[in-house]
Image (cartoon, coloured by chain):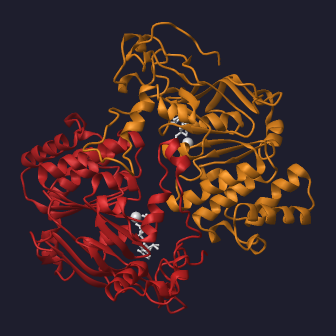
């Protein structure tokens, strides 16, 4: 793709956690939490990341910000390779990339005041005088809609939504360009979620922020994201602009995931032909042979249990890793041998 | 309440109060509802609205102090559970009323095998022999779709995935063939794909076993998919109640209406900006004379501060506790009261 250079470029990122065993605590295996993930994010864009618990969403977010040392791959943010950056240079780069965490309760130090929490990054990365710091703290509190009078209160005196605002204010303190939001609304009540999402969107418009928005709430991701990556067992199985992904998904996992979302409309629910996946997600320490999704895929074919599908681009900005799609493409190109394996389309259901 | 069938469970004016250092919390404030044979009643409401405390009150599961049941009746058949002592209640729990709770304290015990936890109620409540109880336990695990059930009886809870543990909990709740199953957010912690499995299971079990179910959730989508009737709770009270289609088609309470609008949709047009319900949940019992939703309500007027609304019938089995008339957009004129 042409156009401006992406702010974030991730190539073949891998994060394998060692499994230690035996008396010598030697490495006996690896949890392939992230296993070859590539994506770009344009400046000012929001890339949503969805997928079931344990599929590697948080690990991607952390590895991209180099809160983990990745096993392999490159992460280029604003033209600089984060993964290979020496420690001191990384420290200076830190302010431009921040993270907002899921649990507002756990991520705030209970013994620090709100002003202390929001100002902590300023203490660490600037030598501003006190008055200037305080001015900035007030500015940030205004930006996220916290009353300035609360500056000297402690986190326990706030509701979940307010605590999440404190976390967001802190993330904004040093004028970052890129923020990883890891389930920023999951711990909040439905009536409060919309407040926080609207805030994130307003701040994005105001400050030109770029987001990696991790969530298992598919409806909320549809609302906030420009493009969406669907992860399964450490890999991106499909990535597309939000409209395409929700209206015309191509990967059977994306289809199943979307079909599982209950809709607040009884007449739709009654008509819905839901795809219910059997079984659980396999362990990332022991992924199946072939395609990672082959043990649960309702449309599994013989080849799927054998060969891991390539990720192919089927339209500008739309990539899929599935043999159904690859087969379709190649058969289309060679003049159609589609009739050869018609039975396999049905597959067997586990 | 409305149609002919004799309810299996009939709760009237239940009141539960917690005494805390900062005063009384009116967690359940005159809640009434009934449950008819074979139906599924969905209960929704935001965090802290009193859903769990309501159900724990009627099963006598709240420690007192700090909890005190200050009034009401809970009819299960012709017994008022609130008049039973702990011994009587113990016979009801797990036997006539099965429950699956969100509270990990009342969920699976990590130190006992799943087989033990399944056979224990069968032996104590139904006096089954060890071998009969084991056979029934295998049946139950198969019923909730656990493969290789016989072998898995010897496994401990941690050897099961989250979705499977929830199936086991449902199996335990069903062990003694209860008349009523109370499920408190049994799928909230699960992935949507696993939630879909559990919801399918519940639909199937209802057809097979025909028990009446109370299903608590904060997800209106889940309610839309499985409930026959819905009760919306706010601030320890019933804000609105009605048949599922009627309530979703004609939501009458400003809270329900706002809630339906704050949720982004998975299909259809994308909203530029999400609607929000401004403000914070209420402190329960601080202003008992006012409507608990008043401070966040777009339609509140002076009467809402003076008088906590009671439920009024608006037809089609639908009632709402609100002084504002969603049909006219004006304050309610006449004072038709719902007999609940
Ligand atoms: N520090 C670690 N050491 C070993 N394994 C880890 C570590 N962190 C994560 N994992 C494993 O890596 C996999 C991916 O975890 P991750 O937290 O990224 O998932 P996730 O998609 O964010 O899930 P959730 O939706 O539950 O937050 C999981 O199997 C997890 O157990
Ligand atoms: N032991 C207690 N002491 C004081 N207040 C309590 C106690 N237990 C519950 N409450 C209060 O009772 C109210 C109702 O709580 P309940 O657990 O029923 O809410 P809920 O609707 O089930 O919420 P959630 O969706 O978060 O589970 C809350 O305001 C809660 O703070
Ligand atoms: Mg995570
Ligand atoms: Mg609860």
Residue B219 in view here: no
* Placement of B43 over or under B157, stated as above or below: above
Count of residue discs = 0
Q: Indicate whether A220 appears above or below B168.
A: above
Work out whether B322 lies above or below A243.
Answer: above
In which quadrant will I find the N terminus of chain A? bottom left
Find chain A in the image and tell me its colour: red
**Which residue is rendered at x = 60% and y = 49% of the image?**
B103
Task: Determine the residue positioned at 18% across, 54% down.
Answer: A172
Screen quadrant of the C terminus of chain A: bottom right
Between B18 and A254, the residue placed more toward the observer is A254
What residue is at 55 percent from the left and 76 percent from the top?
A346
Can residue B216 be seen? yes
User: Where is residue B137 shown, x and y percent of the image?
Assistant: 81, 63
User: Which residue is farthest top?
Assistant: B334
**A118 or A164: nearer the viewer:** A164
Quick check: B42 left or right of B173? left
Question: Which chain is painted in orange?
Answer: B
Percent position of residue A264, x then y? 47, 43
> Is residue B340 positioned above or below A163 on the image?
above
Q: Between residues B299 and A158, which one lies in front from this camera angle?
A: B299
Q: Position of residue B86 (x, y in %)?
A: 79, 37
Asked which quadrant contains residue A194, the reply is top left
Relative horizontal placement of residue A88, taking residue B85 as reference (left or right)? left
Would you say A69 lies left or right of B14 here? left
User: What residue is shown at x 65% (from left), y 19% (from top)?
Assistant: B340
Residue B316 picture quarter: top right
The quadrant of the rendered image in which ligand 3 is seen is bottom left
Where in the figure is residue A160, as x and y percent of width and height? 37, 44
């Amino acid at each position: 793709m042409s156009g401006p250079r992406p702010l974030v470029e991730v190539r073949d990122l891998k994060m394998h956690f060692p499994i230690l065993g035996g008396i010598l605590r030697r490495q006996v295996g690896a949890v392939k939490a992230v296993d070859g993930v590539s994506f770009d994010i344009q400046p000012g864009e929001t890339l949503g990341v969805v997928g079931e618990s344990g599929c590697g969403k948080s690990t991607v977010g952390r590895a991209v910000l180099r809160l983990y040392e990745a096993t392999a791959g490159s992460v280029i943010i604003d033209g600089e390779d984060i993964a290979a950056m020496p420690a001191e240079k990384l420290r200076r780069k830190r302010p431009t990339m921040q993270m907002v965490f899921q649990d507002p309760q756990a991520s705030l130090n209970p013994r620090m005041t709100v002003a202390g929490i929001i100002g902590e990054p300023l203490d660490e990365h600037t030598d501003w005088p006190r008055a200037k710091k305080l001015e900035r703290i007030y500015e940030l509190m205004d930006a996220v809609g916290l009353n300035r009078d609360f500056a000297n209160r402690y986190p326990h005196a706030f509701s979940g939504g307010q605590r999440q605002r404190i976390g967001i204010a802190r993330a904004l303190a040093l004028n970052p360009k890129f923020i990883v939001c890891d389930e920023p609304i999951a711990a909040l009540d439905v009536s409060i979620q919309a407040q926080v999402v609207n805030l994130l969107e307003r701040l994005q418009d105001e400050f030109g922020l770029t987001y990696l928005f991790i969530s298992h709430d598919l409806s909320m991701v549809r609302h906030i994201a420009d493009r969406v990556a669907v992860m399964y067992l450490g890999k991106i199985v499909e990535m597309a602009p939000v409209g395409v992904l929700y209206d015309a998904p191509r990967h059977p996992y994306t289809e199943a995931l979307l079909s599982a979302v209950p809709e607040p409309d009884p007449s739709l629910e009654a008509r819905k032909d839901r795809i219910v996946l059997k079984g659980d997600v396999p362990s990332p320490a022991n992924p199946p042979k072939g395609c990672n999704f082959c043990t649960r895929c309702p449309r599994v074919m013989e080849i799927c249990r054998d060969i891991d599908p390539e990720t192919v681009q089927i339209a500008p900005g739309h990539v899929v890793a599935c043999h159904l799609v690859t087969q379709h493409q190649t058969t289309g190109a060679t003049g159609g041998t589609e009739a050869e394996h018609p039975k396999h389309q049905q597959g067997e259901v586990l | 309440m409305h149609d002919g069938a004799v309810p299996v469970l009939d709760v009237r004016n239940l009141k539960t109060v917690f005494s805390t250092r900062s005063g009384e919390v009116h967690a359940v404030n005159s809640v009434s509802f009934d449950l008819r044979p074979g139906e599924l009643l969905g209960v929704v409401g935001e965090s802290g609205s009193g859903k769990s405390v309501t159900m724990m009150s009627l099963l006598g599961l709240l420690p007192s102090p700090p909890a005190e049941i200050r009034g009401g009746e809970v009819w299960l058949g012709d017994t008022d559970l609130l008049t039973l002592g702990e011994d009587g209640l113990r016979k009801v729990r797990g036997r006539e009323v099965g429950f699956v709770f969100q509270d990990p304290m009342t969920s699976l015990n990590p130190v006992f095998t799943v087989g033990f936890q399944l056979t224990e109620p069968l032996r104590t409540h139904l006096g089954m022999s060890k071998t009969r109880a084991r056979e029934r336990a295998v049946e139950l695990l198969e019923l909730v779709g656990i493969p290789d059930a016989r072998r898995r009886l010897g496994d401990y809870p941690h050897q099961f995935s989250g979705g499977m543990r929830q199936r086991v909990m449902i199996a335990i709740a069903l062990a003694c063939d209860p008349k009523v199953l109370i499920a408190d957010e049994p799928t909230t912690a699960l992935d949507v794909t696993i939630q879909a499995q559990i919801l399918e299971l519940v639909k199937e079990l209802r057809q097979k076993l025909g028990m009446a179910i109370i299903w608590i959730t904060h997800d209106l989508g889940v309610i839309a998919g499985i409930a026959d009737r819905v009760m919306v709770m706010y601030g320890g009270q019933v804000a609105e109640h009605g048949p599922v289609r009627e309530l979703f088609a004609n939501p009458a309470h400003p809270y329900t209406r706002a809630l339906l609008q704050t949720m982004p949709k998975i299909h259809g047009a994308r909203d530029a900006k999400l609607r929000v319900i401004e403000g914070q949940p209420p402190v329960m019992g601080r202003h008992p004379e006012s409507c608990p939703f008043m401070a966040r309500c777009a339609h509140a007027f002076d009467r809402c501060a003076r008088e906590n609304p009671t439920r009024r019938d608006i037809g089609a089995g639908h009632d709402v506790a609100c002084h504002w008339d969603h049909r006219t957009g004006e304050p309610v004129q006449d004072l038709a009261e719902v007999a609940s």
